[in-house]
Image: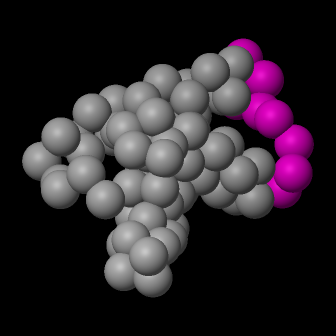
Amino acid sequence: MSLLVWTMMAIAVWHFTVFVPDRFWGGIVGAFVASIIGAIVFGLIVAGFSIPGDSETNIAQALIAIPGSALGLAACYAYGVRTETAS
């Protein structure tokens, strides 16, 4: 269940990318994928590489996904800017 919460929070954070210039690697779809992967990987790291079940899913699981999603978006943006200036 926490995996679903992490994914939904990543999508919610991804919606704020409309306020940033589109320099993400892969465009808006690349930002979408990076946001979801970042939230899931960060959530797994915090949870000790296990997915918490229904009884362990609470508001903290939703808050865990926000920094992971932001890190994924930042990495995607930085790589996009780097490849844009290189070409």
Quarter of the figure with the C terminus: bottom left
Residue at image position (17%, 54%) is 20
- Residue at the spot 55% in from the left edge and 48% down from the top edge: 34
Image coords of residue 6 (percent x, y): 57, 34
From this viewpoint, is residue 45 visible? yes
Residue depicted at 47% across the width and 56% down the height:
25
Vertical side of 26 occupied by 10: above or below: above
Type of colouring? one colour
Q: Is residue 56 above or below residue 40?
A: above
Could you tell me which residue is drawn at 66 percent across and 28 percent down? 2
Q: Position of residue 11 (x, y in %)?
A: 42, 30
Quarter-wise, where is residue 16 in the image? top left
Q: Considering only vertical position in the picture, is 54 above or below 38?
A: above
In x, y percent, where is residue 23? 31, 59
Nearer-the-camera pick, 48 or 19 = 19
Magenta stretch: includes residue 49: yes
In-front residue for pair 11/42: 11
Q: Which residues are magenta?
A: 48-56
Reply above or below: 21 against 78.
above
- Which residue of the protein is positioned furthest toward the left in this rendering? 19
Q: Main secondary structure of the magenta part?
A: loop
Number of numbered discs on residues: 0
- Report x, y in % for residue 40: 66, 43
Q: Name the side, left or right, on which 66 lies relative to 36.
A: left
Asked if residue 84 is among those painted magenta in the image, a careful observer would answer: no
